[in-house]
Amino acid sequence: MKIFIFLITAFIGLSEVFAQKKPAPAPRPNIILIMVDDLGYSDIGAYGSEIKTPNLDQLASEGIRFREFYNNSICAPTRASLITGQYPHKAGVGYFNVNLGLPAYQGYLNKESLTFGEVLRNAGYSTLMSGKWHVGNDSLAWPNQRGFDRFYGFINGASNYYDIGKYGQGPPVELVENNRRINLPADKYLTDEITDHALSYLEEQSKTPKPFFLYLAFNAPHWPLQAPAEDIAKYKGRYSIGWDSLRKERIQRQKTIGIANPEQTIAVRDNEVTPWDNVPFDEKQLWQTKMEIYAAMVDRVDQNIGKLREKLKALKKDDNTLIIFISDNGAQGGYAGSSPRKPQRNSGPAGTAGSYVYQDQPWAYVSNTPHSNYKNNMHEGGISAPFIAWFPKQIKAGSIVKGTGHLIDLAPTFYDFAKATYPASNQGVATNGLPGKSLVPVLTGKTEQVERGEPIFWERAGNRAVRKGNWKLVSTYPGYKWELYDLQKDRGETTDLAASRTEIVNELSADYFRWAEKTGVVDYEKIKPANQIGSPAGRPNRQPPTFR
């Protein structure tokens, strides 16, 4: 009996020891999604730029970069896909945030497409947003009504960065905070304010036991080009070499880093961009100033990302936070049609409040290095963005992979990390299924690119594209002629193979039309508005920049 009691006691003791050693389930990660606006593929250091972005470069060196990550080529459709995980038409924003009278083009997010704010809040996350919304102007479609606990920013597509500046006065910067309309305080810079409000939300949220999701949506470096004088001064004289030489510098740097495959083609020189040597001396001074301001705006975003990382460390949350950085489209080039963009009247020097200068096509040609074309076009320059993901202990440092991800993949990725379930219905409404694939296998090193098993599709204002394996089919409105490229060899889209590979054209075009019918895409000629928003790039603004 004594031996029996001893054995029972020993067994209980060992059971307690093993129970104590059983690892606790890992806490769900915090998630931060950073999006910038109109940033070209090569505009940060980690993708070949001369612009000073040490904080983003550190995230890249400690995390992973994709050579291929796709957006929807322009603001609102990109955000619709990003926020819902749907193709933009399926979410109701197939054209822009204006209503064209059809469900796929209603101009705001529909109820069938849940936002990542709604899904993650239902999964127990605090949901925070600061910055640009641009997927519905009516207050019923604002962030706090679509799943976000806290919101600070602006609802529409563009904003000044200063309300009142040293030189003259611009229009009021109209903002919203948690459904209350406010204005930007005098002499505050909007990029800083977007960050500071996000940091205050994180400080408040740290008092809860919940994980958090933060969507930080900067409007920089979208026009108008306005930046603090001290940041502009850093780049004084840097762009005197002009766009031709700068593009060569970036291409070489991309090859050295490993972002550009040396065996890949690069886009041919844009014939619509005047050679720098042919630009008159006085105009060169004005062009340089524009790029100095643009660089300063990107620099300031990076400084604010540094502030964000410092806050994470102070809150002791940096080790369990996933950070992803992307851009909504390529840099903005020229405008086609009967009314190309004209220089706007400026009430102050370039870069200050009241200044409305914009980057324009020659510098956008550099920003999208080494790709072809610009924002709102479905060639690689319009839909390719930098992609950086950072997550200590989960993502191998210094990784550069092909990736081939798309915006529709981010929501499934977040739900995967958060162990969140995307419901089949919500408040009695059947939800749209998620077409994307989780990026977790690529981020954690199990695969080199997304294994999706089906093509990726694009349509916006008559511009169309399909990506299937190494093949890409693309056409530019108003033409309906398909071009075909083998992106494995020719990401610069220099050699159109449509005439020689008709079987591939037929296959991908059939895929496109099946997708278009299923997704609610309508022939653009039947629905185009009288004043087209963001008409396709093509004819540049040939006039020199005007600063008055």
Image (cartoon, helix red, strand yellow):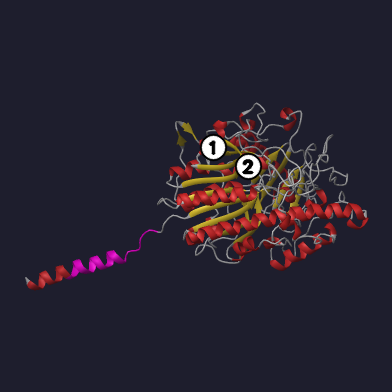
Q: Which residue is mark 2?
A: 184
Residue located 72% across and 49% down the image? 330
Front position in the image: 162 or 96: 162
User: Secondary structure under badge 1?
Assistant: loop
**Relative to 26, is 350 above or below?**
above
Residue numbers of the magenta segment = 10-25
Q: Amino acid at mark 1?
A: Ser
Q: Is residue 406 visible?
A: no
Residue located 74% across and 38% down the image? 534
Q: Residues within 10 Å of mark 2 (few under 14, many from 20)?
A: many
Q: Which residue is mark 1?
A: 113
Q: Is residue 111 visible?
A: yes
Name the dominant secondary structure of the magenta segment. helix
Q: Is residue 201 magenta?
A: no
Q: Amino acid at mark 2?
A: Leu
Asked if residue 509 lies left or right of residue 274, the reply is left
